[in-house]
Image (tube, rainbow, N blue to C red):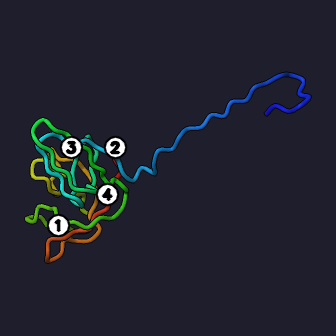
């Protein structure tokens, strides 16, 4: 930092990196002819998370939606109800069915079960990091 009487002139530059967010949500594109419902899970633009609002797009039209991608525990009934979903089981996103599944093949790993499926087909799961 320069001061009066400094023997060698110097210039200081304040360099800051701007923090955009805490990384708990991300704005993604909703493709044409798609309906997104608030509080349901989606895989959009490579990010998996819960939609924060509802959006419907028509033919040739796109829009944006905010996905909650926070590494937190979530509750959902958006699952393949034929599977057990026991606590500790890894869960995957089946994009074709838009449901969570225990099947790893051709599906994206998204988290781990924290509370076994109940009688109403509801689970709790811990959302993993977005890699």
Tell me which residue sits at (18%, 75%) in the image: 118
**Residue 52: x percent and y percent?**
28, 57
Q: Mark 3 points at which residue?
A: 30
Q: In this view, does 19 lie to the left or right of 38?
A: right
- Observer able to see residue 92: no
The mark found on residue 77 in the picture is 1
Q: Which of marks 1 and 4 is in front?
A: 1
Confirm or deny contact between disc 2 and disc 1 (CB under 8 A): no
Disc nearest the viewer among 3 and 1 = 3
The N terminus, quarter of image:
top right
Disc on the earlier residue, 2 or 1: 1
- Residue at the location (26% across, 71% down)? 115
Of 111 and 122, nearer the camera is 122
Q: Which residue reaches farthest bottom?
A: 119
Which-is-in-front pick, marks 2 and 1?
A: 1
- Nearest-to-viewer mark from 3 and 4: 3
Residue identified by numbered label 4: 127
Q: In this view, does 62 lie above or below 93?
A: above
Residue denoted by label 2: 131
N-term-proximal mark, 1 vs 4: 1
Task: List the single residue furthest toward the top.
Answer: 8
CA separation, marks 3 and 4?
21 Å
């Amino acid at each position: 930092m320069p001061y009066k009487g400094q023997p060698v002139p110097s210039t200081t530059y304040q360099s800051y990196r701007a923090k955009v967010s805490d990384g708990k949500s991300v704005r993604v594109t909703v493709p044409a002819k798609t309906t997104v419902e608030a509080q349901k899970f989606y895989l959009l633009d490579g990010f998996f998370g819960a939609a924060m609002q509802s959006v419907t797009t028509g033919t040739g039209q796109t829009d944006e939606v905010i996905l909650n991608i926070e590494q937190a525990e979530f509750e959902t009934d958006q699952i393949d109800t034929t599977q057990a979903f026991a606590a500790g089981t890894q869960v995957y996103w089946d994009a074709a069915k838009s449901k969570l599944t225990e099947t790893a093949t051709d599906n994206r790993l998204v988290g781990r079960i924290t509370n076994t499926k109940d009688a109403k087909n509801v689970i709790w799961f811990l959302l993993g990091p977005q890699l």
